[in-house]
Image (cartoon, grey):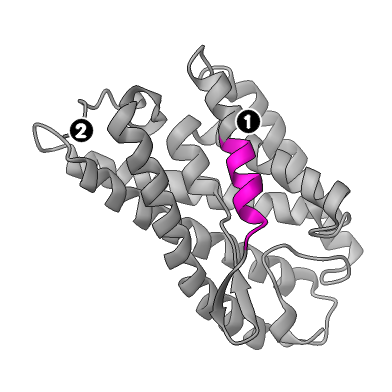
Amino acid sequence: MNVDHVAMHMSDGIVNAPTSLLFGAIAVAALGFCVIRARSELDERAVPLAGLVAAFIFAVQMVNFPILPGVSGHLLGGALAAILVGPFTGALCIALVLTVQALLFADGGITALGANITNMAVIGVAAGYGTAVLLYAFVRRRARVPVTAVGVVAFVAALIGTLCAAMGFVLEYSIGGAAPASLGAVLAYMGGTHALIGVGEGVITALTVVAVARVRPDLVYLMRSTRAEVPV
C-alpha cells in the first residue's frame, strides 16, 4: 500500500486480522452502549431528525472535495450528528451509514468495518461532541447565544473530531499495520491531510447547524440539552 492511498474509510488488508477483530469487538461494545443510552435522547422531535441526519450524511459522504493533488476528502459527520441529535444517537447514525456503505457500495472493507466504526462513529463523535459541549458552555456565559457563535462551535468541534478520528486510524495501524507504509509516513499523511479535510468538515457542519438553529433551535440537541436560549 502506498501511503498516498491511505484513507479514512479503511479498506481490507491495511491492518491484520487480530487488530480487525479487536476493534470490531470495541465497535460492537460501544454501539451496544449507545443503543441503551440513545433512548434518553430520542423523542418525537429527534426520531425523524435522526433519520434525516443519517440520510444527509450518507448523501454528502458520496461527494468528495479536492484537498491536495491526488487527495480528496468527504464529510465524516460525527460532530454534525452529535450536535443535532445527541452523541449516542449520532454514533448510531454514523455506524449505520458506514455499514450500508461497506455492504452495498464497497466503500470501506468488511473486515475493517469495526475499525472504521470505531474511528468515525465512536472516536469522531465523542471528540467532536465533547469539544462542542466545552465550547458551548463557554459561549453561554453571555445572556443570549448568537447563532454565529453556534456556527463557530460546530466548526471547531468538527475539525477536532476529524483529527481525532484520523488519529484512531494511526493507532490501529501502529498496533497491527499490515501494509508496507511506515508508521511515520502514515502519521504525517493522516495528520496533514485531515487537518485540511477537517476545515471542509467544519464549514459544512457549521453551515448545516446554523441553518437548523435559525429556524428550529429546539431541534439542535446541543442547545436543548444545555437549556440554551433561542439564538439571535
Vertical relation: 133 (above or below) 179: above
Image spot of residue 14 (x, y percent) = 82, 72
Q: Is residue 61 magenta?
A: yes
Question: Which label sits in the foreground, 1 or 2?
Answer: 2
Residue extent of the magenta highlight: 53-63
Q: Is residue 229 left or right of residue 216?
A: left
Q: Report helix, strand or loop for mark 1.
A: helix
| Kind of residue at badge 1 | Cys
* Mark positioned earlier in the residue sequence (1 or 2): 1
| Kind of residue at badge 2 | Pro
* Residue at the far left in the pictured view: 143
Image spot of residue 29 (x, y percent) = 73, 37
**Mark 2, residue position:** 231
Q: Is residue 45 magenta?
A: no
Q: On the image, which quarter does residue 139 sit in?
A: top left
Q: On the image, which quarter does residue 143 sit in?
A: top left
Q: On the image, which quarter does residue 61 sit in?
A: bottom right
Vertical relation: 184 (above or below) 130: below
**Mark 1, residue position:** 34
The mark found on residue 109 in the picture is: none
Residue depicted at 45% across the width and 34% down the height: 84
Vertical relation: 211 (above or below) 195: above
Q: Say whether residue 216 is visible.
A: yes
Residue depicted at 66% across the width and 26% down the height: 35
Q: Is residue 71 left or right of residue 16?
A: left
- Tell me which secondary structure the magenta stretch mostly adopts: helix
Image spot of residue 72 (x, y percent) = 61, 74
